[in-house]
Amino acid sequence: MTRVRVLLVEDDLRVARVNRDLLERDPDVHVVGSAATLAQADALAQALVPDLILLDVHLPDGSGLGLLRHWRAQGRTTDVALITAADDEASVRTALAQGAFDYLIKPFTGARLAEVIARHRARRTPRGTLDQSHLDRLLGVSGNTPEPLPRGIDPHTLERVAAVLEGAGSALSAEEVGDRAHLSRVTAWRYLEHLVRVGRASLDHQYGLAGRPAKLYRARGLTEGEMV
Protein backbone atom coordinates (compact mmCIF):
# COMPACT_ATOMS: atom_id res chain seq x y z
CA MET A 1 0.00 0.00 0.00
CA THR A 2 1.31 3.44 -0.95
CA ARG A 3 1.89 5.53 2.17
CA VAL A 4 0.51 9.08 1.94
CA ARG A 5 1.92 11.93 4.05
CA VAL A 6 -0.63 14.76 4.26
CA LEU A 7 -0.36 18.41 5.23
CA LEU A 8 -3.70 19.93 6.33
CA VAL A 9 -4.22 23.68 5.88
CA GLU A 10 -7.37 24.61 7.82
CA ASP A 11 -7.91 27.49 10.27
CA ASP A 12 -10.91 25.91 12.04
CA LEU A 13 -9.32 23.54 14.58
CA ARG A 14 -12.51 21.51 14.98
CA VAL A 15 -12.76 20.94 11.23
CA ALA A 16 -9.06 20.08 11.09
CA ARG A 17 -9.53 17.40 13.76
CA VAL A 18 -12.52 15.91 11.93
CA ASN A 19 -10.60 15.82 8.64
CA ARG A 20 -7.59 14.23 10.34
CA ASP A 21 -9.80 11.51 11.83
CA LEU A 22 -11.41 10.81 8.45
CA LEU A 23 -8.06 10.63 6.69
CA GLU A 24 -6.40 8.39 9.25
CA ARG A 25 -9.12 5.76 9.00
CA ASP A 26 -6.78 4.54 6.30
CA PRO A 27 -3.77 3.12 8.21
CA ASP A 28 -1.41 4.19 5.42
CA VAL A 29 -2.45 7.85 5.52
CA HIS A 30 -0.55 10.00 8.00
CA VAL A 31 -1.30 13.68 8.70
CA VAL A 32 2.24 14.94 9.27
CA GLY A 33 1.33 18.56 9.91
CA SER A 34 -1.52 21.04 10.30
CA ALA A 35 -1.41 24.75 9.50
CA ALA A 36 -3.93 27.48 10.28
CA THR A 37 -2.36 30.32 8.25
CA LEU A 38 -0.66 30.86 4.92
CA ALA A 39 2.67 31.51 6.63
CA GLN A 40 2.48 28.27 8.62
CA ALA A 41 1.43 26.32 5.53
CA ASP A 42 4.31 27.64 3.45
CA ALA A 43 6.84 26.88 6.18
CA LEU A 44 5.50 23.36 6.82
CA ALA A 45 5.31 22.54 3.11
CA GLN A 46 9.02 23.33 2.83
CA ALA A 47 10.03 21.60 6.06
CA LEU A 48 7.91 18.44 5.81
CA VAL A 49 7.76 17.90 2.00
CA PRO A 50 4.38 16.14 2.18
CA ASP A 51 2.99 13.94 -0.59
CA LEU A 52 -0.38 15.70 -0.54
CA ILE A 53 -1.58 19.11 0.66
CA LEU A 54 -5.25 19.69 1.51
CA LEU A 55 -5.70 23.45 1.28
CA ASP A 56 -8.44 25.81 2.43
CA VAL A 57 -9.15 29.04 0.52
CA HIS A 58 -10.24 31.44 3.26
CA LEU A 59 -7.42 31.81 5.80
CA PRO A 60 -6.74 34.58 8.37
CA ASP A 61 -3.76 36.03 6.48
CA GLY A 62 -5.00 35.69 2.92
CA SER A 63 -6.22 33.30 0.24
CA GLY A 64 -5.07 29.73 -0.19
CA LEU A 65 -5.34 30.29 -3.93
CA GLY A 66 -2.57 32.86 -3.70
CA LEU A 67 -0.41 30.39 -1.81
CA LEU A 68 -1.06 27.74 -4.44
CA ARG A 69 -0.01 30.22 -7.14
CA HIS A 70 3.15 30.99 -5.14
CA TRP A 71 4.04 27.30 -4.83
CA ARG A 72 3.61 26.68 -8.55
CA ALA A 73 5.71 29.76 -9.39
CA GLN A 74 8.46 28.28 -7.21
CA GLY A 75 8.24 25.01 -9.12
CA ARG A 76 6.64 23.04 -6.27
CA THR A 77 4.60 20.27 -7.92
CA THR A 78 3.20 18.62 -4.78
CA ASP A 79 -0.34 17.32 -5.29
CA VAL A 80 -2.81 19.87 -3.89
CA ALA A 81 -6.54 19.46 -3.38
CA LEU A 82 -8.76 22.28 -2.18
CA ILE A 83 -11.11 21.63 0.76
CA THR A 84 -13.13 24.80 1.27
CA ALA A 85 -16.46 26.54 1.61
CA ALA A 86 -15.56 28.68 -1.44
CA ASP A 87 -18.20 27.50 -3.90
CA ASP A 88 -17.94 30.22 -6.53
CA GLU A 89 -16.95 29.29 -10.06
CA ALA A 90 -14.05 31.76 -10.12
CA SER A 91 -12.35 30.06 -7.16
CA VAL A 92 -12.79 26.62 -8.68
CA ARG A 93 -11.42 27.72 -12.05
CA THR A 94 -8.46 29.48 -10.44
CA ALA A 95 -7.58 26.44 -8.34
CA LEU A 96 -7.70 24.10 -11.32
CA ALA A 97 -5.73 26.53 -13.48
CA GLN A 98 -3.01 26.58 -10.80
CA GLY A 99 -2.75 22.80 -10.87
CA ALA A 100 -5.03 21.61 -8.05
CA PHE A 101 -6.10 18.09 -8.98
CA ASP A 102 -9.33 18.06 -6.93
CA TYR A 103 -11.73 20.45 -5.24
CA LEU A 104 -14.08 19.60 -2.36
CA ILE A 105 -16.80 21.99 -1.24
CA LYS A 106 -17.73 21.85 2.44
CA PRO A 107 -19.59 19.97 3.74
CA PHE A 108 -18.44 16.75 2.06
CA THR A 109 -18.65 13.05 2.85
CA GLY A 110 -15.94 10.75 4.13
CA ALA A 111 -16.33 8.73 0.94
CA ARG A 112 -15.56 11.80 -1.18
CA LEU A 113 -12.45 12.51 0.88
CA ALA A 114 -11.38 8.89 0.37
CA GLU A 115 -11.67 9.49 -3.38
CA VAL A 116 -9.13 12.32 -3.08
CA ILE A 117 -6.65 9.92 -1.48
CA ALA A 118 -7.37 7.26 -4.11
CA ARG A 119 -6.85 9.73 -6.97
CA HIS A 120 -3.61 10.92 -5.39
CA ARG A 121 -2.36 7.33 -5.10
CA ALA A 122 -3.28 6.63 -8.73
CA ARG A 123 -1.30 9.69 -9.81
CA ARG A 124 1.75 8.38 -7.94
CA THR A 125 1.66 4.87 -9.41
CA PRO A 126 5.15 4.40 -10.94
CA ARG A 127 5.06 3.49 -14.63
CA GLY A 128 7.68 3.93 -17.33
CA THR A 129 5.03 4.81 -19.89
CA LEU A 130 1.28 5.41 -19.72
CA ASP A 131 -1.46 3.87 -21.79
CA GLN A 132 -4.67 5.82 -22.30
CA SER A 133 -6.57 4.14 -19.48
CA HIS A 134 -3.88 5.03 -16.94
CA LEU A 135 -3.58 8.56 -18.32
CA ASP A 136 -7.36 8.95 -18.00
CA ARG A 137 -7.11 7.94 -14.36
CA LEU A 138 -4.28 10.43 -13.83
CA LEU A 139 -6.39 13.19 -15.36
CA GLY A 140 -9.55 12.10 -13.59
CA VAL A 141 -11.30 11.46 -16.91
CA SER A 142 -14.07 8.88 -17.06
CA GLY A 143 -16.28 7.94 -19.96
CA ASN A 144 -19.01 6.68 -17.66
CA THR A 145 -20.74 8.01 -14.58
CA PRO A 146 -19.63 5.79 -11.70
CA GLU A 147 -22.36 3.69 -10.14
CA PRO A 148 -22.96 3.82 -6.39
CA LEU A 149 -20.97 1.23 -4.46
CA PRO A 150 -22.86 -1.94 -3.58
CA ARG A 151 -24.03 -2.41 -0.04
CA GLY A 152 -21.20 -3.67 2.16
CA ILE A 153 -18.41 -2.15 0.03
CA ASP A 154 -16.63 0.59 1.96
CA PRO A 155 -14.83 3.17 -0.22
CA HIS A 156 -11.80 3.42 2.08
CA THR A 157 -11.33 -0.35 2.16
CA LEU A 158 -11.92 -0.60 -1.59
CA GLU A 159 -9.14 1.86 -2.33
CA ARG A 160 -6.79 0.09 0.09
CA VAL A 161 -7.34 -3.16 -1.79
CA ALA A 162 -6.95 -1.44 -5.17
CA ALA A 163 -3.73 0.24 -4.02
CA VAL A 164 -2.29 -3.12 -2.93
CA LEU A 165 -2.92 -4.54 -6.41
CA GLU A 166 -1.57 -1.48 -8.21
CA GLY A 167 1.61 -1.47 -6.16
CA ALA A 168 2.25 -5.21 -6.25
CA GLY A 169 3.81 -5.61 -9.70
CA SER A 170 2.49 -9.16 -9.88
CA ALA A 171 -0.73 -11.14 -9.55
CA LEU A 172 -1.82 -11.82 -5.97
CA SER A 173 -4.18 -14.22 -4.26
CA ALA A 174 -6.96 -13.01 -1.97
CA GLU A 175 -4.95 -14.22 1.00
CA GLU A 176 -1.89 -12.21 -0.07
CA VAL A 177 -3.98 -9.09 -0.62
CA GLY A 178 -5.64 -9.59 2.77
CA ASP A 179 -2.25 -9.83 4.49
CA ARG A 180 -1.01 -6.62 2.87
CA ALA A 181 -4.24 -4.67 3.43
CA HIS A 182 -4.77 -6.07 6.96
CA LEU A 183 -8.02 -7.78 6.02
CA SER A 184 -9.33 -11.31 6.26
CA ARG A 185 -9.02 -13.48 3.16
CA VAL A 186 -12.81 -13.54 2.70
CA THR A 187 -13.12 -9.75 2.96
CA ALA A 188 -10.23 -9.24 0.54
CA TRP A 189 -11.82 -11.72 -1.90
CA ARG A 190 -15.14 -9.83 -1.78
CA TYR A 191 -13.45 -6.52 -2.64
CA LEU A 192 -11.27 -8.11 -5.32
CA GLU A 193 -14.32 -9.62 -7.00
CA HIS A 194 -15.94 -6.16 -7.03
CA LEU A 195 -12.81 -4.68 -8.66
CA VAL A 196 -13.00 -7.38 -11.33
CA ARG A 197 -16.69 -6.63 -11.96
CA VAL A 198 -16.06 -2.91 -12.48
CA GLY A 199 -13.02 -3.48 -14.70
CA ARG A 200 -10.31 -2.26 -12.32
CA ALA A 201 -8.77 -5.72 -11.88
CA SER A 202 -8.47 -8.93 -13.84
CA LEU A 203 -8.72 -12.52 -12.64
CA ASP A 204 -6.45 -15.41 -13.64
CA HIS A 205 -6.62 -19.05 -12.67
CA GLN A 206 -3.42 -20.87 -11.78
CA TYR A 207 -3.68 -24.63 -12.20
CA GLY A 208 -1.59 -26.87 -9.97
CA LEU A 209 -1.13 -30.57 -9.79
CA ALA A 210 -4.26 -31.22 -7.77
CA GLY A 211 -7.28 -29.48 -6.29
CA ARG A 212 -9.08 -26.36 -7.43
CA PRO A 213 -7.18 -23.76 -9.48
CA ALA A 214 -5.88 -20.81 -7.47
CA LYS A 215 -7.47 -17.43 -8.19
CA LEU A 216 -4.95 -14.66 -8.81
CA TYR A 217 -5.82 -10.99 -9.21
CA ARG A 218 -3.89 -8.14 -10.80
CA ALA A 219 -4.58 -4.49 -11.48
CA ARG A 220 -6.13 -3.86 -14.89
CA GLY A 221 -3.45 -2.70 -17.30
CA LEU A 222 -0.65 -4.74 -15.70
CA THR A 223 0.48 -7.13 -18.44
CA GLU A 224 2.29 -10.43 -18.10
CA GLY A 225 5.49 -8.76 -19.28
CA GLU A 226 5.33 -6.32 -16.38
CA MET A 227 4.87 -9.04 -13.80
CA VAL A 228 7.81 -10.37 -11.82
Image: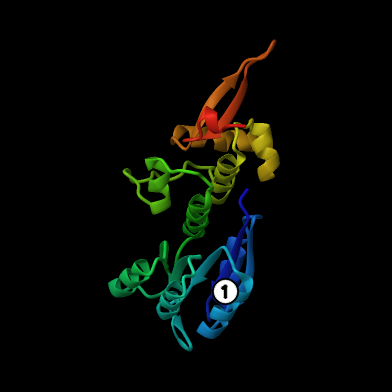
Amino acid at pointer 1: Ala
Instruction: Work out whether 169 lies above or below 214.
Output: below
Q: Residue at x 38, y 47 (%)?
A: 136
Q: Considering the numbered disc 1 on the image, is that residue within a helix, a strand or a loop?
A: helix
Residue nearest the viewer, comparing 214 with 225? 225
- The single residue placed furthest to the top in the displayed view is 210
Closer to the camera in the image, 87 or 210: 210
* Coordinates of residue 116 in the picture (x, y in percent): 48, 58
User: Eyeballing the image, is 14 above or below 24?
Assistant: below
- The answer to which image quadrant residue 68 occupies is bottom left
- 50 vs 74, left or right, is right
Residue placed furthest toward the left: 89
Taking the image as shown, residue 168 lies to the left or right of residue 72, namely: right
Looking at the image, how many numbered discs can be counted on the residues?
1
Residue 91, image x and y in percent? 33, 74
In the rendered image, which quarter contains the C terminus? Answer: top right
Residue 172 visible at all: yes
Residue 12 seen: no
173 is higher (above) or lower (below) than 47? above
Q: Which residue is mark 1?
A: 45
* Mark 1, other Cα within 10 Å: few <14 / some 14–19 / many ≥20: many
The picture quadrant where one finds residue 93 is bottom left
Residue 20 x %, y %: 60, 67
Q: Position of residue 66 (x, y in %)?
A: 41, 80
Q: How is the image coloured?
A: rainbow
For the point 39% across and 43% down, the residue is: 147
